[in-house]
Amino acid sequence: MIKFVTALAQKLARPYPASKPLKKHPAIEATSERAIPFLLQPLEGAKTIAIGFCFAGGMAHDPVDGPQTSMSAPRALIDSAMRRTNHQLAEKLKDLQASFVLKSEAEAVVGCVAGPPANIDEIVRLSNQVLTSTDIPAEVLEDVKRLLAAQILEQAEDVDTKAQESFLSALCNPHPYIQALLPEASRIEQISDADIANWIRVNIVLARLRICIVGDLETTSAGQLVDRLFEGLPTGSMVDKLPPVQFVASAKEPIFLHHGGEPQAFVGIGGRSAAASRPSDWLAVRMLAHALTGDDKSRLFREIRDTQGVTYGLQYRFDFFSSTGFFVVFGSVSKQKLAEVLSAIRKSVRGFVEEGPTEGEQRSAREAFLRQVEQLNHNIVEFAYQLTTLRLFGWSVDDINAVESRAAGLSLSDPKYLHLLMPEEPLLVIVE
């Protein structure tokens, strides 16, 4: 997916790795004194507190004027706060070893505030100034529009982006989510001050908030941080749900895109898959996708490398909203060998789905997934992001607490999960 990320400064978006193993306690659902619900993931010994949050409703939720306003508004909020303080706000956050990120994605406006426990109160106070910077100067908006127009034009020429857009468009009937992936640069100029002001009034509201806090702190302290971070935001209203994605039958023949570059092909493979809102299905399919495509030990990688001498450099990626499963991009393939490689890809995927993973592949996929879960304890900001995303897509606190045990107990050879992984022939997209 295309990610339009806005941040105070790239170096302020710190990963905050943990220096030693941390003890993870079960996540807790709680409510602040101002009646704002949140999830707390206690990590005993953590030297960082991260507050992940999102406002449900993102670029795909703007069907009238497209995703351009959703892209522009978070950056305008940040730049407005910077200008109003003569950029002292950024310097203060840097001195406090803080991280503040706000970004627009298709499903939501996602953010994170993080820093050392000793500084977190002041970090939260300063971050609140950004979220409440509703008076956007005209010159700030013009600068933001120029920057985003340039980013869109650059992304539009990206081979991977073109392939994935065609991939999704071929799997689904027209849908706002697909429109959000590649906005039109020409429409950026049409955004007005009133558009931005209305977007902030509708989107940056308490009713749309999902909040997850990771760190070594008690529920009461966490609730106080929540109240201070979001103080001054209006209550607002819930976001309207997008219509469901309507899938169409996958194309039996590869889709060819003409890029105009070197006379070699980039091969993308993927298919629709399990929705993130069904935890067991999604976990099983995620592990199966890893067994099929996830690393140099996976079935597809080994078989295509050994039989065709071709490998891929981009591991599978999941698309939460549209349930399109994974998408793998191979490296360049000569046109003379293309038909043979495509046939081998289809044969490898079909064999995996029909036969199921071997015991060794199941074990490897489980271990890889559980390693990823464990690594989140060492990247507290990423942990907060992941929890917030899962909450956005309907995971309960029990679902979150049971991730490891559920993943360990799922039968990856179950035909139900194999069918969810790839219910039809894989869709192939060729960029020439």
Image (cartoon, rainbow, N blue to C red):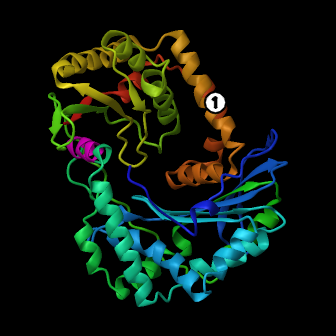
Inspect the magenta stretch and tell me whether residue 259 lies in it. no
Residue 13 drawn at (x, y percent): 62, 59
Inspect the magenta stretch and tell me whether residue 167 lies in it. yes
Which is nearer the eye, 105 or 85? 85
Q: Is residue 192 above or below residue 332?
A: below
**Based on the displayed image, in which of its 4 quarters is residue 418 positioned?**
top left
Q: Is residue 134 above or below residue 322?
A: below
Question: Looking at the image, can residue 177 be seen?
Answer: no
Q: What is the magenta range?
A: 162-171
Q: Is residue 410 left or right of residue 125?
A: left
* SS for callout 1: helix
Q: Is residue 141 left or right of residue 400?
A: left
Residue 229 drawn at (x, y percent): 67, 74
What amino acid does circle 1 point to? Answer: Leu
Q: Residues within 10 Å of mark 1 (few under 14, many from 20)?
A: some
Which is nearer the eye, 65 or 211? 65
Q: Is residue 326 left or right of residue 219?
A: left
Which is nearer the eye, 428 or 264? 264
Residue that appears at 37% across and 42% down: 323
The residue to which callout 1 is attached is 370
Q: Is residue 192 left or right of residue 104?
A: left
Residue 205 drawn at (x, y percent): 53, 76
Which is nearer the eye, 193 or 235? 193
